[in-house]
Amino acid sequence: MEGIFNRPNNIRAKQIAYQADKAPVYLKGNGKIWFRAYLGLFAVSFIGSNFQLIQYIRGKAKKIGE
């Protein structure tokens, strides 16, 4: 039990290292994975919706029931 209760306090060192990083907060830790996944899904949905909108404008989109 000695190893559990008498561990050195590393919080200050971790805080200094975390604050020294120049990356934005949303890109620190696992945030970069989630942020890139969000941007990827956003790009796919944006491109898909614009493609479909252009198809409707040109009159070439398939209508439901045809």
Image (cartoon, rainbow, N blue to C red):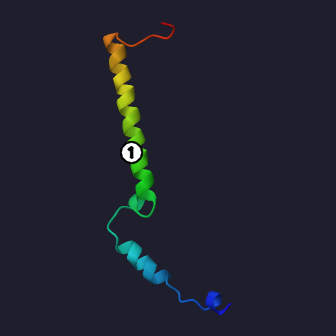
For this orientation, the residue located farthest to the top is 66
Task: Using the image, determine if residue 41 lies above or below residue 55.
Answer: below
- Residue at 53% x, 87% y is 9
For residue 33, what is the image quadrant?
bottom left
* Whole-percent x, y for residue 60 in the image: 35, 11
Vertical order, 26 against 39 (above or below): below
Q: Residue at x 40, y 79 (%)?
A: 16
- Which residue is depicted at the point 37% across and 15% down? 56
Q: Residue at x 57, y 89 (%)?
A: 7
Say which residue label 1 marks: 39
- Extreme right residue here? 1
Quarter of the image where one finds residue 43 = top left
Amino acid type of the residue tagged 1 in the rendering: Leu
In the image, residue 13 lies at what x, y percent? 43, 82
44 vs 66: above or below: below
> In the picture, which quadrant includes the N terminus?
bottom right
Q: How many marks?
A: 1
Residue 8 position within the rendered picture, expressed as x and y whole percent measured from the top left: 53, 89
Classify mark 1: helix, strand or loop.
Answer: helix
Q: Is residue 45 above or below residue 54?
A: below
In the drawing, does residue 32 fall left or right of residue 22?
right
Mark 1 surroundings: few (<14), some (14-19) or many (≥20) residues within 10 A: few
Residue 40 coordinates in the image, percent (x, y): 38, 43
